[in-house]
Image: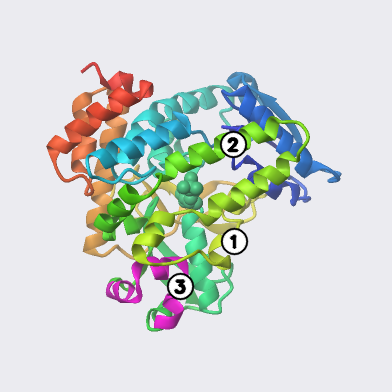
Amino acid sequence: MKLTILGGGGFRVPLVYGALLGDHAEGRVTGVTLYDTDAGRLGAIAGVLAEQAAGVADAPVVRATTDLDEALRGADFVFSAIRVGGLAGRAADERVALAEGVLGQETVGAGGIAYGLRTVPVAVALARRIAELAPDAWVINFTNPAGLVTEAMARVLGERVVGICDSPVGLGRRVARLLGADPDEAWIDYVGLNHLGWLRGLRVAGRDELPRLLADTGALGSFEEGRLFGPEWLRSLGAIPNEYLHYYYFNREAVQAYRQAKQTRGAYLREQQAGFYADAVRSGGSALAAWRRTLADREATYMAANREAAGAGERDEDDLEPGGYEKVALALMRAVARDERTTLILNVRNGATLSVLDADAVVEVPCVVDANGAHPVSVAPLPYHAVGLVTAVKAVEREVMAAAASGSRAAAVKAFALHPLVDSVSVARRLLDGYVAEHPGLAYLARH
Ligand code: G6P
Ligand code: MN
């Protein structure tokens, strides 16, 4: 099998390659092509992968290229993990929003809309190229905002594109462990959109064990989401929300914490990553060691502002455990390539899963995966308050896609204005102006 990684110079590529190195079975990936627009980043990451592969006899062969067509030809799987505008773009997304007093986050609220408006046109162009040059390839989308980008790509690629995120997997694993269940055996009832979902139950042998956790204040205080939301609110909800719902349920505190932070997440990562890429190409030291140090630091500081706002303290070992992102990707590829049926929480077209959304809406739900692709299983309906958030945010995503397709400024303003975390149409207009001024990638919205 041949895997092509778009955004092959990206920081998380060694995680994926590390997972591939552990797969020795028939039908595994034997060749990896890294594609990136930045040759310097490609070189740095190729250096890390070479160190990872040392001593592994059947290590997948790595090739790096800045030629997209060459990268796509012959691919069985395409991973898309790009960052349009880079981390400087992410930092600008945060800055413009915070200046208006609203949340600037990579995937949620105004920041997520700006990032989506920049990314959708690029992702759609990539999808078209894939449809032309590798029409039988399966596409795994990691690119954030992952739900929106997957839906935009699905308009070109249909069911051949599947979006993934490690947040629901991490949540499921933490809750299963606390309940003494095997995360791979338990049935995890998780439903929503990407970064907007709820774990509503965890069944072992047909029995829902979640009420036992909700009743246990001590246990609730012992894991990431429990500390972020607090036992009382979790009991009120009767569910454990995805950590990204902290931006909704505690919006005022989150915005305040972002404003007070020494640096926003994007600004911090821009500096951290620039340091890593500069070190990695410098001769002498180990690029792999530098990568590992940088990764540990990145994981330890993840959502630090939210944890501070919630008084949640440091992350503990279980919260830091790696193996989410790349494990889902590998499990998905194995299930498809070898027809090994498995269940994974993925971003796929809704079909008839949630009756409040149309069939083409991409949702994040448990799916049965085999050689025919990923198919959502049926789930119980969402409660009204969750329906409200999910449908409101889906409406925003649709406006982003409309703006990206037509260049309509009115659609872009509507996307900002309809978001539950943007509190005025005037703010929405100023946000769009602010973003267009910052991002060359949004010039297409400046015209009409
Ligand atoms: C989580 C999210 C991803 C996000 C990642 C890194 O795993 O699900 O969508 O890319 O965190 O966040 P960071 O702030 O480190 O870039
Ligand atoms: Mn994610």
Please state which of residues 292 and 420 is positioned toward the viewer in this rendering.
292
Specify whether residue 336 is in view: no
Q: Nearer the viewer, residue 157 or 182?
A: 182
Tell me which residue sits at (29%, 35%) in the image: 96
Magenta stretch: give its range. 217-236
Q: Are marks 3 and 1 in contact (CB under 8 Å)?
A: no
Q: Give amino acid for label 1.
A: Glu
Where residue 355 appears, x then y in whole percent? Answer: 28, 55
Q: Amino acid at mark 3?
A: Leu
Q: Is residue 410 part of the magenta span, yes or no? A: no
Q: CA distance from mark 3 to mark 1?
A: 20 Å
Name the residue carrying label 3.
202
N-terminal label among 3 and 1: 3
Residue drawn at point x = 29 percent, y = 71 percent: 237
Circles 2 and 3, Cβ within 8 Å, touching? The answer is: no
Q: How many marks?
A: 3
State the residue at coordinates (60%, 57%). Answer: 322
What x and y, as percent, mark residue 440? Answer: 37, 20
Which residue matches tag 2? Answer: 275
Q: Is 195 left, or right, of 33 in this rendering?
A: left
Q: In the rendered view, tell whether residue 358 sits above or below residue 208.
A: above
Rounded to the nearest whole Å, what is the CA distance between mark 2 and mark 1?
A: 24 Å
Is residue 226 found inside the magenta-colored segment of the image? yes
The numbered mark, 2 or 3, whose residue comes first in the sequence reads 3
From the image, which quarter does the N terminus lie in? top right
Helix, strand, or loop for circle 1? Answer: loop
Quick check: is the Cβ at mark 2 less than 8 Å away from ligand 1? no
**Residue position marked by numbered label 1 in the rendering:** 321
Residue density around tag 1, few if under 14, some if 14–19, many if 20 or more, within 10 Å: few
User: Mark 2 or 1 closer to N-term?
Assistant: 2
